[in-house]
Image (tube, rainbow, N blue to C red):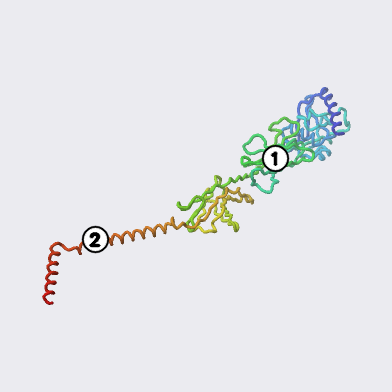
Amino acid sequence: MLRFLHILLTGLLGVLWNKVTAFDGIRLVNGQSKCSGRVEVLHRNQWGTVCNYGWDLREADVVCLEMGCGLSEFDHRDAALGAEFGAGSGEIWLRHVQCSGHESSLTHCAVILRSNPYCTHENDVGVKCSGTLLMPTLSLLSPHTVFSPGEAVRFSCSVLLGHHISDFHLYKHGVSTPLVTQRVDQSQTRGVELTLSDVETFHQGSYSCRYKLKGFSPSQLHSSPPSNFINITVVELLTPQHWYNTSAEAPAGSVIKGHSFNITCSTLQQYPGASFQLRLIRSNGTVRQSLPALTPSVTFTFSSAQSSNEGYYYCLYRVQLGGRTFVSRESQPLPIAIRDPDPVLSPMMISWLVSGLTFVVAVIIIIIVAKVLCNREKKPSELERETRTCVDNTYVALSVNKL
């Protein structure tokens, strides 16, 4: 509060100062680059220095940003020592300058008139700037990089020099607008948590973060470069479909005992290393078996149906990614009943019946043909009957004579 009142009062005095004098420029002298050195301002066509009295990080940041050099890396405690980049000469134009940190130029900061007459060139202030805005660091607070729809992804965006930052933004690669924005308070000077809630499959991709500085209109100068990228994966497993096949004579929903049948599980999405699980729930327990999902559809084959194969079948799709196991919802139940073979309809019985009937018909035909042939052989002709009668009469006559 005292700091605010102090800046307010000095600001009023600064307005009065600006009406009296005007500064035409600012430069850094005796530094190792254009972004470091002793601070000098131009007034009345003469360059003069700035006293370090009351100088801290706010003033240093304003100078660095005005020079297009990012933020200050110079410890304001070093500034109190003065003449870090050598003593200047000529006038000391600014003896006590106070900035809020939101100004676009040092010459817009408040200046206390006739303040600290004891400033000398041994107190000339200097700054060392980062050159550009420092790149923030994005880290993943969540313990994994693979997520299910509806889960939250927690990131942390931080920067080594956290002062003067207004807010942090989380960006998805290829999207120009931020997905998450978090304003900074005094307790979050170096970084914030950015939470992406209720993720969906379209959130899958690469993410980075940026920060913006307080009090400046959005521009490339006052928006940091993007951080490192972090990839996240969103796994959405669809409920698999299933169906079964068996012999044609089996009624719907049934398999004839001893016959083969198969159950096929299928899904539209496929992930490497996944597998299908077929679960059978029957009266005396549950049976599971798995096959690798090398293709979108996998078939479980049963060579000879038994009573133990009767029950409700369910398909599941299972995959391990990023150290996590993901399992789809169960498919709808597929009831299968195992029926004993019907003797009337049994193919073996039908084969036996056909063979038996064929044999009987063949025997009957043979008997009929044989009788016809036999009768034809036994029936005498007219001559044979007359001869037989004559012979018979002679035999009778001979028999009488003997008597």
Element type where label 2 sits in the image: helix
Residue sitting at x 79%, y 28%: 108
Q: Nearer the viewer, residue 186 or 389?
A: 389
Observer-side mark, 2 or 1, equals 2
Q: Callout 2: few (<14), some (14-19), or many (20+) C-alpha neighbours within 10 Å?
A: few
Closer to the N terminus: mark 2 or mark 1?
A: 1
Where does the image place residue 301, in percent across and percent down from the top left?
50, 55
Instruction: From the image, tell me which residue sits under label 1.
Output: 135
Where residue 360 sits, quadrant-wise, is: bottom left
Who's the residue at 55% across and 59% down the image? 308
Name the residue tied to disc 2.
Answer: 372
Is residue 291 at least partly visible in the picture? yes
Q: Nearer the viewer, residue 232 or 5?
A: 232
- Relative to 290, residue 163 above or below: above
Number of other residues with Cα within 10 Å of mark 1, as a class: few under 14, some 14 to 19, many 20 or more: some
Percent of width and height locating residue 195: 70, 41
Viewer can see residue 295: no
Could you say where residue 39 lies in the image, as x and y percent from the top left?
Answer: 78, 33
Measured Cα–Cα span from mark 2 to mark 1: 115 Å
| Circle on res. 72 | none
Q: Quick check: 247 above or below 163?
A: below
| Quadrant in which the N terminus is drawn | top right
